[in-house]
Each structure stands twice: as structure tokens, then as C-alpha cells.
Image: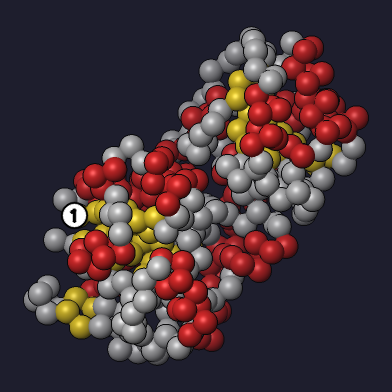
Amino acid sequence: MYKFLIYISHPYSIPIGMPLQKEIENRGYQVYWFSDLEYTKKYFDSPNLLLQTVKEVIDYQPHIVLTATDIVPDFFSGIKVQIFHGFLSNKREEMKSHFRIRGFFDLYTTQGPSTTKVFETLANKHGYFEVVETGWSKVDPLFPIEEKIKTERPVVLISSTFTTRLSLAKNEAVFAEIKRLVASGNYDFLCVLHPKLEDNIKDKFKTLTGEHFTYFDTTDLIPLFKKADIMFSDTTSAIIEFLLQKKPVVTFRNNKPDDHLIDITEVSEIENGIKLALTKPSKTMDAIEKYIHITHPYFDGKSSVRIIDAAIAFLNKDKSHLKSKPLNLVRKRNIRKLLHYFTFKSYSKPLTLTLDSTNKKQ
């Protein structure tokens, strides 16, 4: 009976863990959740599966901690598995952050070749963790890709990051153009904004609600992806999730506007960008196909299966070849401050289960 813990911070990580929870339960194993941020707890539909305190996690003694955060308590038992909280969004800081090795994880389950290669190089350099390419659990519900039901008007999904210099939602001229397009009645808009965006920005977009505009306060984006013909966005990892459907994305001043995006830089170009995207230009669609195959070449909806398989295999394998994790004193102190839990306990080597599952060694 393997014991799993899904470790998150923000509510937008709940859809990452849900397919994993389902897969774990299908196998008859035990699973609980833990969030290191108090406000996230109100978003859980099954609070009985949420451990409320650090003490409850320690008493639970998980074998496998599936982590959708950058850090994880080193004093929790079990192997620490990085499952990631997003795709590379091309924001400068997130590009650095995605590949930063922080000394907490035993296993990285990567999304596709473009990230696997980097992490394998880092694994060889550091020597205390392993890497397995699995795909990403959050996008499992996207597959198999369903043909979109034809609608009277094209459906455009608006999404936006919270980073001020990149956010279309914080651009007054962009908002005014969206308002004009909504009033034209030529398109139906769905809108979902990053949870970290200020409430006054969200409230402004909510004022557009009507026959041709619907605002969604949700972290479960996949049902919206399926309804939309195209996306209008800026620089956010949700773009990549949407592209996996092989649908075009119009971006406004994207941080890295490659051929798989239809990028525009002026507000006056927004409607023409939308019209172009709706034609699915061959150059763009070919670039999307190539981009998907290096980013997330899994279309079977079974990334969660591969993650759980990889975690269990790693838990049970001989790991004597791995080095001990670094001392990492500053980050260890910071996570103790975050959780208001101070202990000298720290696991420097990953847990290995022997044939006798009661005989555990760290």
C-alpha cells in the first residue's frame, strides 16, 4: 500500500494534481494533499483528503511526495518528485526558475524533450537525482482531442499573465479594443485571468459580461480550451497548454514570438490577428506541430500513469549510486519559516522500499 502526498501552493496547481489523485485511487493506493498556503485550502472539493497541518503530514509518513512547487520540506518522509506547476512560459525569470536546481528533489518527471535534455545534463552534473520523461499530468483531460462543435460565431478565449510588463489585462488600450470587439457581436469571448491579478483588473473585465462575453473565475482551464477556436493572450504558460490541441494562439507582445504564435505588437492589429488565426495559416500550423513534439509529445492522456509508474519504480530501485543532497541550509531555513515548523530532521538520501515494505531506510 503506497502512500502518496500531493504537495502544492496555489489553487492553480489543483488541476495538476487531480489526474494524479484519480490514477492513485484507481490503483488502490492512499493519497492526501497538502498546501503550504492557507488561502488555497478553500478551493478543495474534497477537504477530507487535505491534511491541514505539518504534524498530520509527518504522522502520515508518505512514501512519495508529488510536488507542484519549486521547493518541498526536506523533513517530510518519502521521495520528493518534481511534477512542475507549469510549462516554460518564456518569461525571463521563469526560464531561469524552471531549470534551477534547489537541492530538494530526488526525481524530476519532465514534460518533453526540450526540458528533459536540460535536466538530464543537470542530473549528471549534480549526481543526487534522476530524470524520467513522462509528460504533464495537468493536460491529461485534454486527450483524446475532440473535434470542436461548430458555433454561430468564432469563440475566442482571452487569458493573461499577472506580470505587469507582459500582461494584456493591465493595458488600457487593449481592454478598450476588447470592449469594442465584444460590442461588435462578431465573436463570442471567454475570459479567464491569472489568479494573482489584482481584483480591480478582474472586476473591470467582468463588466463586459453579456451575450458575447463570459468571465470565468476558475483554475480548471481545459473545458474552456475545448470550447474555444483560438486564444488571445500575452506571455503565459496557458498558451502552451492550449497549443496542444493544435489550435492557433494570437499573442500581444509575447516575450519570445516564435513561428508557432501569431504575435502582434499594436492594439490596432488585434482584430486582424484574430481573423488570421481563424484561417489556421499553414505556416503557423506546421510550426505548432513541430513545437508540440519537442514540448509535450504525448497525446494519450496517460502522463499521470507514467508519473506514478516512474515514482514507484524509483521508490523501489537501488539508489546507492546517488550522492547525498547538499546541505542547502538557507532554503531549509526558509521552508521551516514558511510552514512555522522548526526541526533538525532532514532526509539527505531518498527513501528506498525493500521487499519487506515495513523495512524502510532513508
Is residue 256 rendered to the left or right of residue 141? right
Q: Quadrant of residue 19?
A: top left
Foreground residue among 94 and 337: 337
Q: Quadrant of the C terminus?
A: bottom left
Is residue 17 rendered to the left or right of residue 251? left
Foreground residue among 161 and 54: 54
Residue 240 x, y percent position in the rendering: 61, 46
Foreground residue among 277 and 350: 350
How is colour applied across the structure in the image? secondary structure
Mark 1, Cα crowd under 10 Å, few <14 / some 14-19 / many 20+, is few
Q: Secondary structure at mark 1?
A: loop
Query: In this rendering, is residue 287 above or below 208?
Result: below
Q: Is residue 230 visible?
A: no
Residue 3 x, y percent position in the rendering: 21, 61
Give the amino acid type for the residue marked by disc 1 in the picture: Tyr
Q: Residue at horizontal 33%, vertical 79%?
A: 343
Residue 288 x, y percent position in the rendering: 66, 44
Q: Quadrant of the N terminus?
A: bottom left
Q: Residue at horizontal 57%, vertical 54%?
A: 87
Residue 357 x, y percent position in the rendering: 12, 73
Q: Can you identify the residue that label 1 sits on?
A: 29
Q: Quadrant of residue 79?
A: bottom left
Query: In this rendering, is residue 182 above or below 10?
Result: above
Q: Is residue 176 visible?
A: yes
Q: Residue at horizontal 46%, vertical 87%?
A: 326
Q: Residue at horizontal 24%, vertical 44%?
A: 48
Is residue 44 rendered to the left or right of residue 159? left
Foreground residue among 260 and 83: 83
